[in-house]
Image (spheres, rainbow, N blue to C red):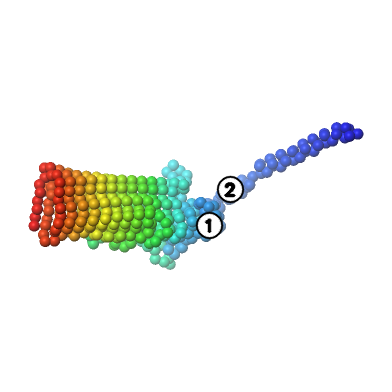
Amino acid sequence: MKHHARITLAPLIVIISTLIAIVIIFSTNTAESKPLFTTEQASITKHETIFSSTLSPASPIKDRNTGSSSSSCITYAPSTRTITVTCTSASMTEIYNKLQDNSILSKQSSPQGGTSNIWFLNANLIIAKGATFHIDSTNTKWLKISSKVTRGAGSAKIAPAYILDVHGSLKIDSVKITSWDPTTNYYAITNGSRTGDITHPGAPRPSIVVENNATGTTDITNSEIAYLGYEQGQHKGGSGLSYYYGGDGSIIRNNDIHHVYFGLYTFGVGHMIIENNIIRNSGHYGLDPHTGTHDMIIRNNKVYDNNGSGIICSLNCYNVLIENNKVHNNAGEGLDFSRNMYNSIARNNIIYNEPKGILVSQSHNNMIYNNTISNSGDGINVGYGSTRNKIYDNIIMNSISDAILVNKGSLENTFSSNKIVSATPQGLKINQDATSKNNVFSNNQLVNSAVSTKK
């Protein structure tokens, strides 16, 4: 009996197992083949996604790094046309998904057809303290910022130009950022001008501004920054790319910065690195570290065709290293140590075709050495009130005016081992009076050049 039971039970188990497998397979295939939407439903869903932005709420935004919900960290104020970002990490895509309003931020078609990573921003953008905003190749190729400010009826006063206003941290990498005039479908090109205290206002163009006590760095790498900033009567924020007591430790590297009103302006910022950039065709200065800027490295840059000095550090700047730059064909000085710049170094720079190669004006305790200066007005000009500067081992060739000019009121400067070749009219010109004392000259080599001393 036991043996017979084993024979009849086995086929029954096989039959039951087979039936269970058939049910599982049928259920699985049915689930996989059932569409989430009918064709009609899919069409309606697509239509609503594109056109009904004002009718349906946006989906929660996911934090770029953590994936957490951040739907409340992007807000928009219509009265000032200002987007404010408080997210730990966000980008243009998150703003677009939240606002869903093409009059504020739109994604433009590529010349080849279809959408692209070209954005058109028609508003101010504030990155709040503690926030980090990314403009990079993940979802951006070109950010165009409108030069035409939109003002609605009853709106609060809006600044003449839109600003990327950084109180937190901004990371720009491998993108293009410019102004854009929607009426001409081209860059905004009229930036105005400044000569001393005389200004000629330009048409408003947007700017990138890093604010006082920003909580992070604003790093700009591998990018093109162009057609920003304008003359607005020496008010804050019109330079195009500026850091005001904020952004300490920021890096600006491997960029093409051109047709920006000031290529770069800093105010009281420390520990920045500016290297391997092309800075050209600025409306005023190329690089302008200013007012207490300190512990900055400026190296391996090409600075040319700017409408003022190539590199000027002015008003209480200190511990600035300027090295291995190529500076030429600027409207002002190649390098300018101005108004109490001190404890700084300019070395291994190549400077040519400038009104003055290097100007030292009311500045102190600096070292200028191993530079090559050619085909300029004055090679090195040491101006009134400059003291205890060391100028040595420079090569100065084919100066149109004086290779080295020492002006009245300069004290205790040393000039040694400089080589001066074919300067006209003088290789070394010294203007002295009772205010000029204890300047020391030693081992300077003059080839086809003369010396002139005036008292």
Q: In this view, does 143 lie to the left or right of 312?
A: right
Vertical placement of residue 297 versus 28, above or below: below
Q: Can residue 163 be seen in this view?
A: no
Say which element carries label 2. helix
Q: Nearer the viewer's eye, disc 1 or disc 2?
A: 1
Q: Which amino acid does label 1 sit on?
A: Ser
Instruction: Locate residue 170 relative to residue 50 in the image: left or right.
Output: left
Q: Residue 43 carries which label?
A: 2
In percent of width and height, residue 197 lies at 23, 62
Query: Nearer the N terminus, badge 1 or badge 2?
Result: 2
User: In which quadrant will I find the N terminus?
Assistant: top right
C-alpha span from label 1 to label 2: 29 Å
Amino acid tagged 2: Ser
Residue holding disc 1: 70
Give the residue displayed 14% in from the left and 58% down from the top: 437
The answer to whether one can see residue 17 in this image is yes
- Tell me where residue 221 appears, x and y as whole percent: 38, 48
Number of residues whose C-alpha sits closer than 10 Å to that of mark 2, classed few (under 14), some (14–19) or many (20 or more): few
Q: What residue is at 33 percent from the left and 48 percent from the top?
A: 275
Q: Are marks 1 and 2 in contact (CB under 8 Å)?
A: no
Q: Under tag 1, what secondary structure? A: loop
Task: Report the disc number at residue 190.
Answer: none
Quarter of the image where one finds residue 162: bottom left
